[in-house]
Image (cartoon, rainbow, N blue to C red):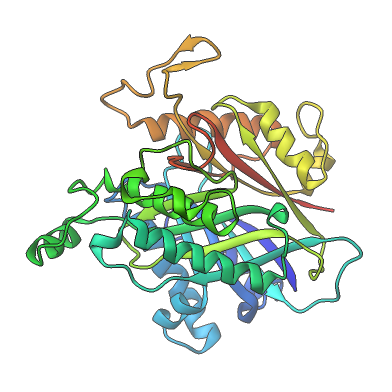
């Protein structure tokens, strides 16, 4: 297995010109594309339609080149979008390809992809979602040939949240839901997906979980899960990234834990974990070796960062996730010299409360 990575800029949620140019130039073979992970300039909420807009735009680009329908493109390629490019964050898409290759002398980046079945509204944010994601993660491990969970550095999961229509459907059938609030359902959906990763990787025992623990027992978590929820999905898409002895290519991945939203040392620790040691800010040469950064952003539960008060959790005008994404995005860009970073809000069961995961892919 050889994983290729191409980061393309986006001038709008429907701008596919970056990938189109790579296809026209023969740089990317469309038949090898397996996933697209990106940031769109929406609000990141339950009503953020830029994610679905971006997906259909890429499906329409790739359908004629693959000789299939746009719907089939969506079944063949995993699309994961996070809305919200506040502050310095730049809208972009990271395109992953997968092809055959000779094994490298040392472990290289491998990518496993699996999807769950469609989930009923009453299963979103509940133990059924935990178990479905755990099963998908295990299938990804088998696909990548990764035997040791310590070699897994990033598990991106995108799944459904509760829309008003799904809430109405459940109520009409008398089914109990995790919550009646569409935006509030993100907490339970993200949490359940993260706990599914934790169970599959042995970070949390399923016996310690219950419906009541999801979104509440935040002492139970995964250190490598990054989960997002959106109304455009009905199932969960799992993308597992790790270093496998069966992989080839020139990419490696590492990860670290961010102590807070201004933890530049955590950014450097993730790069070092992947094999690139940056002292302060990356040099021009080092920046060329940084292929991609994926991070979660969170507000401090105490309302303090390094002893200083902030208003992320008390601002009635701007959601705390938007504050956190903007702050962390600027910190990461100050180290990497690239604002095209995947920073997603909300860290329920993704590292300890107040902390957040970060992963770095580098060219070796």
The N terminus sits in image quarter:
bottom right
Q: Position of residue 195 (x, y in %)?
A: 47, 51
Q: Position of residue 122 (x, y in %)?
A: 23, 61
In screen coordinates, is 30 left or right of 208? right
Q: Is residue 245 visible?
A: yes
In screen coordinates, is 134 left or right of 98? left
Q: Which image quadrant is residue 348 in?
A: top left
Residue drawn at (54%, 50%) of the image:
225
Q: Is residue 11 visible?
A: no
**Is residue 43 shown above or below 239?**
above
Residue drawn at (50%, 62%) of the image:
134
Q: Nearer the viewer, residue 183 or 8?
A: 183
Q: Which image quadrant is residue 268 in?
A: top right
Residue positioned most to the bottom: 67
Q: How many marks?
A: 0
Q: Nearer the viewer, residue 207 or 239?
A: 207
Q: Position of residue 216 (x, y in %)?
A: 36, 38
Residue positioned most to the left: 172
Q: Nearer the viewer, residue 74 or 347?
A: 347
Q: Position of residue 126 (x, y in %)?
A: 32, 55
Residue drawn at (55%, 36%) of the image:
356
**Is residue 61 shown above or below 355?**
below
């Amino acid at each position: 297995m050889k994983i290729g990575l191409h980061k393309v800029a986006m001038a709008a949620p429907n701008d596919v010109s970056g990938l189109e140019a790579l296809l026209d130039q023969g740089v990317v073979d469309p038949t090898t594309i397996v996933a697209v992970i990106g940031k769109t300039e929406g609000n990141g909420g339950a009503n953020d339609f830029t994610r679905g807009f971006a997906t259909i735009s890429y499906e329409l680009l790739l359908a004629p080149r693959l000789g299939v329908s746009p719907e089939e493109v969506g079944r063949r390629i995993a699309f994961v979008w996070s809305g919200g490019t506040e502050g310095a964050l730049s809208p972009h898409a990271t395109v992953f390809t997968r092809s055959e290759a000779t094994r490298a002398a040392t472990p290289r980046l491998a990518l496993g992809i699996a999807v769950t079945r469609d989930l009923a509204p009453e299963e979103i944010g509940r133990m059924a979602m935990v178990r479905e994601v755990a099963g998908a993660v295990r299938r990804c491990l088998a696909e990548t040939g990764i035997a040791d969970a310590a070699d897994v550095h990033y598990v991106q999961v995108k799944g459904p949240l509760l829309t008003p229509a799904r809430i109405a459907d459940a109520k009409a059938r008398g089914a109990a839901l995790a919550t009646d609030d569409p935006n509030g359902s993100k907490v339970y959906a993200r949490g359940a997906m993260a706990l599914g990763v934790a169970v599959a990787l042995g970070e949390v025992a399923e016996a310690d979980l219950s419906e009541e623990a999801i979104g509440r027992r935040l002492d139970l978590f995964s250190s490598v899960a990054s989960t997002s929820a959106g109304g455009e999905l009905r199932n969960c898409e799992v993308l597992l990234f790790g270093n496998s002895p069966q992989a080839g290519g020139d990419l490696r991945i590492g990860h670290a834990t961010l102590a807070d939203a201004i933890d530049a040392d955590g950014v450097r620790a993730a790069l070092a974990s992947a094999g690139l040691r940056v002292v302060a800010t990356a040099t021009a040469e080092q920046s060329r070796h940084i292929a991609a950064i994926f991070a979660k952003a969170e507000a401090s539960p105490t309302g303090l960062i390094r002893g200083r008060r902030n208003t992320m959790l008390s601002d009635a005008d701007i959601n705390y996730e938007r504050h956190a994404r903007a702050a962390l995005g600027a910190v990461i860009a100050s180290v990497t010299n690239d604002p095209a970073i995947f920073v997603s809000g909300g860290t329920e069961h993704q590292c300890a409360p107040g902390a957040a995961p970060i992963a770095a892919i580098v060219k070796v």
